[in-house]
Image (cartoon, rainbow, N blue to C red):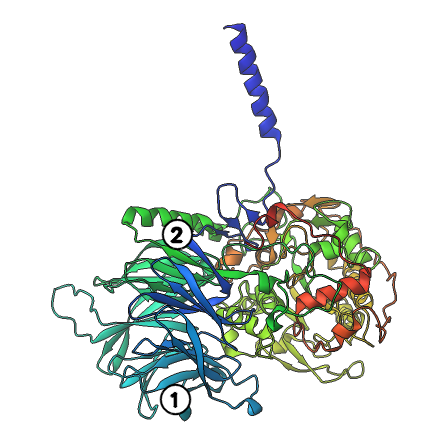
Amino acid sequence: MNKRIIVLFVSILAVAALLSSQPAPREQVGPLPDGGYLLNSGWRVDPAGTQIPLDTLPMSCVLTKDGRYLLVLNGGYRPPSISVIETASMHEVSRTSVPDGWLGLALSPDNKTLWVGGGSKASIFEFTLSDDGKLTPARTFEIIPAAGRTYRDFIGDVAVSPDGHLLYAADLYHDSIAVINPQSGRVIDHFKTGRRPYRILFAPDGKTFFVTSWADGTLYQHQTTDGQRVNSVRLGAHPTDMVWSDVKPATEDGSPSPLTARLFVTAANTNSVYVIGVTGNDLRVMETINVGMTPRHPLGMTPSALALSQDQKRLYVVCSDANAVAVVNVGETQSDVRGFIPVGWYPTAARVLDDGRLVVLNGKGSRSYPNPNGPSPMKKKTSVDKGGPNAQYVANMQTGTASVIAPFNPEQLASYTQRALDDSPYRDEMMNGYERPAGNPIPERPGDPSLIEHVIYIIKENRTYDQVLGDIGKGASDPSLVLFGERITPNAHKMARQFVLFDNFYVNADVSAGGWNWSTAAIAPDYVEKMWPNSYAGRRKHYDYEGGEAAALPPAGYLWTNAIAKGVSLRNYGYWVTNKKAPVAEGENQVNQVRDPALAPFTNLQYRGFDLNYPDVERAKVFLKDFNQFETTDQMPKLILLRLGNDHTFGSAPGKLSPLALAADNDYAVGMVVDAVSRSKFWKSTAIFILEDDAQNGPDHIDSHRSPALVLSPYTRRGVVDSTMYNTTSVLRTMELILGLRPMTHYDAGATPMYSAFANQPDLAPYDVEKPRVSLTEHNTENGVAADESRHMDFEDADLNDDDELNDVLWRAIRKTAPPPPSRSFNSRTAGE
């Protein structure tokens, strides 16, 4: 062989060997080399078509009768608005603010008047629409006068009768339909309906109307004259959108169809669309269309909205938690799903234009963003919802889009379908088990034996990775962004060093409303996703996202629901509880109510829920008293739920415990628990999982969802950095495998188990708690840094304040300097586009 060829061949082999020896590129949230974006959930977003920018949470739309304009309601964290999009060019020709708006959009038959459901303003807002696409505010129809309103007065959907004479509005929390005469602007009646009425749809003849009940799993039919119920049909959980089709499907023998029409209804807590046959006033379920992307697809698709093609033979199903639209042929005897179209993050609505283009609203756009340092600390912060500057708060940054998709043929749909499938991390094979390192203590599949028998699950509040561990000196850490460094959180740092440091862990949620659901149910239900931006913007002043609200239940229950069903022993400390107004003496019950009746028998009522005035150290003592009893009886529950949330802090609120004191209290309480468990007889068979419910816009140089997490066990690898991309549902999936529980949704079913965090051989060395290095009783002064900004804040529950403002306060209170200049990263290249 020619010597030059030999040298070239050897060189090629050497290069190949070098390349093969290099570690795989770090997988983390951000833009992908081949296009698209990797989300904190582990899903990719790679939307088809052209993307049109909108505002926060675009959630409903209506097409003018002539097809010239598409009107979109932006109902998210920023002040609500109506975008008017010219369909020929798909350019936004106007954007008009509305005092509040949520879901409801209705056009008059003459196309000149628009009515908007006024959300927390308990009103309907009227606008006139000009020929050039401009909206002009007109009248306001108050359903509930302003002086008497409470958080329960909330108007959602709005529908206009076919003759244009009456408006019907969903009075969400009074479980009724308000009837308004648009001539006089007066409310002339209220009709009772199912709990949490979501959508209103008139039959074409105007004699009856239909209502989907978000909480009852039921479709109701009422007479328009007096609201009397004509029919009801039980469907799946969380019925939402519906469309009417008067095109009858083909029959097998070619005979005329006996149907008057069909109603298609989505059920968001299922993977199903229900086909209701309408014959006169009779309703019956004809079919159930499963929009799962695979034969064994778990719950979690969240079908929430619908659109019909012009010929009514093709149904488009918006699947919010799959970032996709299912394409269903409904023109034959039996409906069948033909494929999927990848769209943006959390799609909420769809419309088919007159030329056949499909428009899909994406509630969260097509990516997430880093938040280098948040707002300027040099002046008093005014939150965006109150007209302040655009700040890097996750609820403000996460603006929506519209995907505009041209008509496609079967070959293009097949290509779209493959993209949509590739964007999902879930595969049916995962239900049969995972590939794991040989000898790893985490099972391959639920029900397999595990060396770990006990799980302690600790959830904290609202911190990013760099806020706490940025100074740890290894991994992807930025010390310039630390607020609660090693002096404040010595136990968090010691545990991360002594056990395993996760520098690529992300929470699935944006805020605590979603975080507590993601952390316990592997999803944030559609109620939570659609309601929290209104609450967090301070319009609906109520927090009902942690139990107690019938419409907020998740598709497959909570972690404890599945544990109870499986017979896994359980003990709860602080999850889903309502405290007594003030703390009581040691040994007495601190809790008035457990908001999930299934959890109540397993709850220690002496353990106080979220209350920043009550020390986490005292909570730890209550738990340790029980734990000592477990030792005495040699009986420890398999699953222990433990809420320790004082790392949330009061900010600089005068007279309250300082942020450093609260963070140190939380850190010490966690250390006390780990110290005691690691010295017990149960340590050899226990794993402790600790995470934040959300990251809530603290500073982080990689992504606003990156957060500290800890896994502590004799089987945890010691002293290493695990840069595998994990998230909240990875923790859930790992605990489920240990406890023998099936996944709850496609998120935990498709999550990466934390195999890399565990070693084959145990190290039984106990953990030595680090005592606090700062005072746990230090209080904020009356005139401390940012005290004025903190005075007005409400800390009764976890997330009643603007968190961007709270983080601004924390930086100034702790660092007492301006933050460093914004850090830019690979992930921030397109921030603000």
Q: Nearer the viewer, residue 626 or 58?
A: 58
Residue 292 falls left or right of residue 354: right
* Residue tagged 1: 179
Spatial CA distance of label 2 from label 1 is 40 Å
Q: Sequence-wise, which precedes: disc 2 or disc 1?
A: 2
Q: Is residue 709 in view?
A: no
Secondary structure beneath dot 2 equals loop
Mark 2 neighbour density, 10 Å: few (under 14) some (14–19) many (20 or more): some
Tell me the quarter of the image containing the C terminus.
Answer: bottom right
Residue 283 numbered mark, or none: none
Q: Residue at x 78, y 50 (%)?
A: 471
Residue 432 falls left or right of residue 351: right
- Whether residues under marks 2 and 1 lie with C-beta atoms below 8 angstroms apart, the answer is no
* Residue tagged 2: 49
Secondary structure beneath dot 1 equals strand
Residue type at numbered disc 2: Gly
Q: Quadrant of residue 87?
A: bottom left
Q: Residue at x 53, y 64 (%)?
A: 523
Q: Is residue 153 in view?
A: yes
Residue type at numbered disc 1: Val
